[in-house]
Image (cartoon, grey):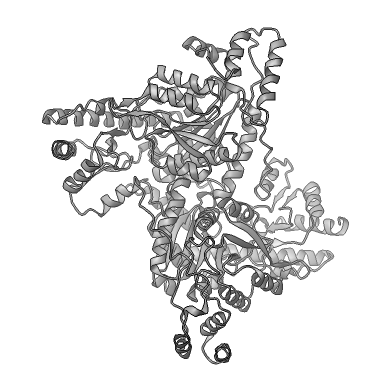
């Protein structure tokens, strides 16, 4: 058999055929995954491509033709079908829906009252100025990103006069929006922090549960949302933080908790801070909605700033996706508040070692827009007005939805719609009701019953109210 | 004060609550109260657990009671034991260059194109595309899909492989937008680290420094194969073939598509064919890094020969593609990862899994740079103008090679400098030693990476003489 193969290999089969024959003679199929799965269960191709797989008859028949083809076997043939992302998948499903009155309340992207995406005026102006300036170039940013952007982001989050800012104790690096900042910070911690365990609230943004394990942190939880009151389970939260190990990392939503919209009161924040400091835990803040919660940037930063003022250390992942409407430009910053400027300097150096092998340096455009807006007094003031406008429209939608449900006499207490803070309402609808509303009314939301108020408009409130009313009355 | 301090550090902590007034006193002094400082800042250092605690307690017990004004404990950071991170070997060159106050300094470090006036260049087609995009008020800044801008992915795939390539036509290639070359390498490698049966990658010696950082982070074991021959300043083809043969079946093999970085030494087409046959015979998985398509010969298709021949033989491969250099989009971080699979079904499965790598890394890629690329590649006139600008850049680099070579020849600088002409792409691997490199930096303020690699793109007609002086002096007087 082998002699015949070798003989055939020197005849005119063609380059491709010769390779195949040579490979088969060498008992390795060139396309198959290789010498067998690593642990017997990796997505590799069909094992070692043993010649026994190809019976002699078909082999010779194949070689007789101009081109020899192995049945193509992919190294990836055994990959599992990846599940659609639970949040982004909502928009995927929405886009596929042909129904003309469909309503997307899935992802937290702001819409105008006409239901349109919104690019802020200050962003358009900043962008036009940047692009029109031919003295600007597109050189690589430093690994840590645009310096002006970092400085201004830090000042926005903490306040330009904050003691931690003034004492140079904060290392700030530009990252890819909130997700990127969380991942870089978490990867740094997994490598360098003495207790690589992070506690997240229940519930939390779905992607937290993916980011942290990937980064190498062990993921645990603390009680947060109380379905009975649709408010904060403060006692449970404090108990769980107390029970958590000293030194653990604690994830905190700076404001406008996602998905519940339930935030601690200032007094509660103070108590939370005292427990965390007493247990020397490391707070990791996720700030994606500064300015969206109350409409006031400083008020929304209360928790963040009080932690940063007590001398203790903390991390902050800051996003400009929502409050500057820069979603797709991926603009954010990771700030590490350290006990000393020297520690901050060491941290910055190590953060660069996380970033460089991930994407080398961050993207320029969005950061330049933010730096332009924050660095210009007029643009900054106008931004605050636009931001307040967005926050106010969301609050208006809360009012309208609440009134609509009250007017219909929809069973249940709907005051949480008014009380919850930020972009989302955690409706309390169950999965069955959610599915019902999608199927019958083409209303799309995440499976946990979270709706994006930013996706509602005056004209679509009635439809949503009808859908909720029907679901609550008729679907368990 | 001491009593409350001791309460604070005991494990059964009954902390003294911080009232609002104590918060404001923090604000006014900018310093933490000493008792709370001790509470907050005592590091839970496993190694030092007992000793550390005791040491601090002892120290404070004997100190006089601090007043508010001097209430500044030596703040202890959980990060204080971090090691000083070394500066990046490549980017650190520019950092050092920027710090240098000398007016005649020359930066030949990082591979970013410069005009003959020594200025960065934003391509005209990029300016045009960008202006148009930004002026279009019907455009939004919504999140891209996890896999990025669809038009960009399609056009990038076609640019790399050719729109009519059988693998493209057969839908066997899944392409996702990545953060330039680095991001595409990382996503691809992380996917393989998780799903490929032989998570070992072989890289050429030498290779781009960052490869050796990306792959371990992604979970791949890094090994190497011989590549550069210092004796000939060319390809050690025999050594390469031997090492690929000796490498395990099924291992991943990193290949530079063209304009090898840092050496500028590329296999000839016949050599590529032999390399390909060997890799296919051993069922190894080629991972191509393409950062210079169009820069090597000035022709996009000619530069893609290796890539396209591998993609045409029915086998699988991965490609990390960058627009940093050939479209001058460096800081916008534009690139793509393409996975050429045996079947369209496999390509679909791969795409789904790639999304699971990207989502927890940065959710979705940045819009701006990809939109620029998609605009340029999709319009006949812009595409045509781009190719002309690209060729212009490649030609200027080739011209610098000739000028440098001629000048060294004229100077009578010892040694054979023909490799300056033979090497391909943005860089020249000069063969200068580390002491010579350091000497040139110190005396002549000429900056290059420690391996003697110079970026020809950073040279200009005006600066060639200065470089020649430096090289000549170094070669004659430094070992």
**Identity of the residue furthest to the right in this view:** B477
Can residue B302 be seen here? The reply is: no
Q: Quadrant of residue A222?
A: top left
Q: Position of residue A74 (x, y in %)?
A: 46, 69
Q: Is residue B16 left or right of residue A395?
A: right
Q: Residue at x 33, y 30 (%)?
A: A261
- Quarter of the figure with the C terminus of chain A: top left
Q: Is residue B232 left or right of residue B426?
A: right
Q: Position of residue B374 (x, y in %)?
A: 42, 58
> Is A442 rendered above or below residue B451?
above
Q: Is residue B349 left or right of residue A356?
A: left
> Is A460 rendered above or below residue B90?
above
Q: Residue at x 48, y 41 (%)?
A: A212
**Identity of the residue furthest to the left in this view:** A408
Q: Quadrant of residue A187?
A: top right
Q: Position of residue A364 (x, y in %)?
A: 50, 45
> Is A193 rendered above or below residue A312?
below
Can residue B205 be seen here? The reply is: yes
Q: Position of residue B326 (x, y in %)?
A: 54, 60
From the viewer's side, name the closer residue of A450 and B57: B57
From the viewer's side, name the closer residue of B105 and B188: B188
Q: Quadrant of residue A123?
A: top left
> Is A306 rendered above or below residue A427?
above
- Disc tally is 0
- Quarter of the figure with the N terminus of chain A: bottom right
From the viewer's side, name the closer residue of A445 and A473: A473
């Amino acid at each position: 058999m082998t002699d015949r193969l070798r003989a055939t290999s020197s005849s005119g089969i063609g380059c491709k055929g010769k390779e195949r024959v040579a490979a088969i003679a060498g008992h390795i199929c060139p396309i198959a995954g290789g010498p067998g799965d690593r642990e017997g269960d990796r997505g590799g191709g069909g094992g070692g491509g043993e010649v026994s797989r190809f019976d002699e008859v078909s082999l010779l028949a194949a070689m007789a033709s101009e081109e020899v083809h192995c049945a193509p076997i992919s190294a990836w043939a055994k990959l599992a079908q990846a599940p659609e992302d639970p949040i982004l998948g909502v928009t995927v499903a929405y886009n596929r829906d042909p129904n003309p009155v469909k309503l997307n309340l899935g992802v937290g992207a702001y819409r105008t009252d006409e239901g349109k995406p919104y690019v802020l005026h200050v962003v358009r102006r900043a962008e036009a100025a940047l692009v029109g300036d031919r003295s600007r170039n597109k050189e690589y940013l430093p690994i840590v990103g645009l310096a002006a952007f970092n400085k201004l982001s830090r000042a926005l989050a903490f306040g330009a006069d904050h003691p931690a800012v003034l004492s140079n104790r904060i290392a700030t690096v530009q990252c890819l929006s909130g997700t990127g900042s969380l991942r870089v910070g978490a990867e740094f911690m997994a490598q360098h922090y003495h207790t690589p365990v992070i506690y997240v609230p229940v519930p939390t943004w779905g992607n937290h549960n993916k980011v942290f394990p990937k980064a190498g942190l062990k993921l645990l939880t603390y009680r947060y949302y109380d379905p009975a009151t649709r408010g904060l389970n403060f006692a449970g939260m404090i108990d769980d933080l107390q029970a958590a190990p000293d030194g653990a990392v604690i994830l905190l939503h700076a404001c406008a908790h996602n998905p519940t919209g339930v935030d601690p009161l200032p007094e509660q924040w103070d108590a939370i801070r005292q427990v965390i400091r007493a247990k020397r835990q490391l707070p990791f803040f996720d700030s994606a909605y500064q300015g969206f919660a109350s409409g006031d940037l400083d008020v929304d930063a209360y928790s963040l700033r009080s932690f940063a003022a007590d001398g203790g250390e903390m991390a902050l992942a800051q996003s400009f996706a929502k409050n500057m409407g820069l979603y797709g430009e991926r603009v954010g910053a990771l700030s590490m508040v350290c006990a000393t400027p020297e520690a901050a300097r060491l941290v910055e150096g190590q953060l660069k070692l996380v970033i460089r092998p991930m994407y080398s340096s961050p993207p320029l455009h969005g950061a330049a827009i933010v730096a332009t807006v924050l660095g210009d007094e007029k643009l900054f003031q106008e931004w605050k007005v636009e931001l307040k406008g967005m926050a106010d429209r969301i609050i208006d939608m809360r009012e309208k939805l609440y009134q609509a449900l009250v007017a219909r006499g929809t069973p249940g207490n709907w005051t949480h719609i008014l009380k919850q803070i930020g972009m989302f309402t955690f409706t309390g609808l169950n999965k069955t009701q959610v599915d019902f509303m999608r199927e019958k009314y083409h209303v799309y939301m995440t499976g946990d019953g979270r709706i994006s108020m930013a996706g509602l408009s005056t004209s679509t409130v009635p439809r949503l109210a009808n859908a909720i009313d029907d679901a609550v009355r008729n679907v368990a | 004060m001491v009593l409350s301090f001791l309460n604070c550090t005991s494990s059964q902590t009954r902390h003294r609550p911080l009232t609002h007034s104590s918060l404001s006193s923090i604000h006014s002094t900018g310093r933490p109260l000493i008792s709370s400082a001790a509470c907050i800042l005592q590091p839970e250092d496993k190694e030092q657990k007992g000793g550390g605690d005791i040491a601090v307690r002892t120290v404070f017990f004997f100190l006089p009671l601090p007043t508010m004004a001097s209430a500044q404990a030596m703040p202890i950071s959980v990060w204080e034991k971090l090691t000083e991170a070394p500066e990046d070997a490549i980017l650190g060159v520019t950092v050092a260059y920027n710090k240098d106050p000398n007016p005649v300094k020359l930066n030949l470090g990082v591979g970013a194109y410069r005009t003959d006036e020594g200025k960065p260049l934003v391509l005209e087609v990029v300016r045009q595309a960008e202006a148009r995009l930004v002026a279009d008020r019907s455009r939004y800044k919504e999140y891209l899909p996890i896999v990025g801008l669809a038009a960009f992915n399609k056009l990038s795939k076609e640019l790399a492989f050719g729109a009519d390539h059988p693998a493209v036509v057969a839908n066997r290639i899944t392409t996702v937008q990545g953060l330039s070359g680095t991001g595409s390498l990382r996503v691809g490698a992380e996917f393989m680290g998780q799903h490929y049966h032989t998570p070992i990658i072989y890289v050429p010696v030498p290779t781009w420094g960052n490869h050796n950082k990306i792959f371990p982070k992604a979970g791949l074991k890094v090994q190497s194969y011989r590549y550069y021959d210092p004796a000939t300043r060319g390809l050690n083809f025999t050594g390469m073939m031997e090492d690929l043969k000796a490498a395990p079946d099924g291992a991943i093999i990193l290949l530079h598509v063209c304009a090898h970085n840092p050496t500028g030494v590329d296999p000839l087409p016949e050599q590529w064919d032999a390399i390909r046959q060997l890799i296919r015979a051993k069922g190894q998985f080629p991972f191509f890094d393409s950062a210079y398509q169009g820069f090597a010969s000035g022709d996009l298709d000619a530069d893609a020969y290796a890539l396209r021949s591998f993609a045409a033989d029915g086998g699988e491969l991965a490609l990390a593609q960058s627009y940093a250099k050939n479209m001058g989009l460096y800081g916008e971080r534009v690139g793509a990862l393409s996975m050429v699979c045996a079947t369209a079904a496999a390509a679909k499965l791969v795409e789904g899994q790639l999304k699971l790598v990207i989502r927890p890394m940065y959710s979705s890629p940045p819009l701006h740079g990809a939109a620029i690329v998609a605009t340029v590649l999709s319009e006949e006139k812009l595409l045509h103008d781009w190719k002309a600008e690209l060729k212009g850049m490649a030609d200027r680099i080739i011209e610098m090679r000739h000028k440098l070579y001629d000048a060294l020849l004229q100077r009578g600088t010892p040694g054979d400098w023909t490799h300056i002409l033979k090497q391909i792409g943005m860089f020249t691997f000069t063969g200068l030693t580390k002491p010579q490199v350091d000497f040139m930096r110190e005396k002549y303020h000429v900056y290059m990476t420690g391996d003697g690699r110079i970026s020809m793109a950073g040279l200009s007609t005006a600066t060639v003489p200065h470089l020649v002086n430096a090289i000549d002096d170094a070669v004659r007087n430094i070992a």
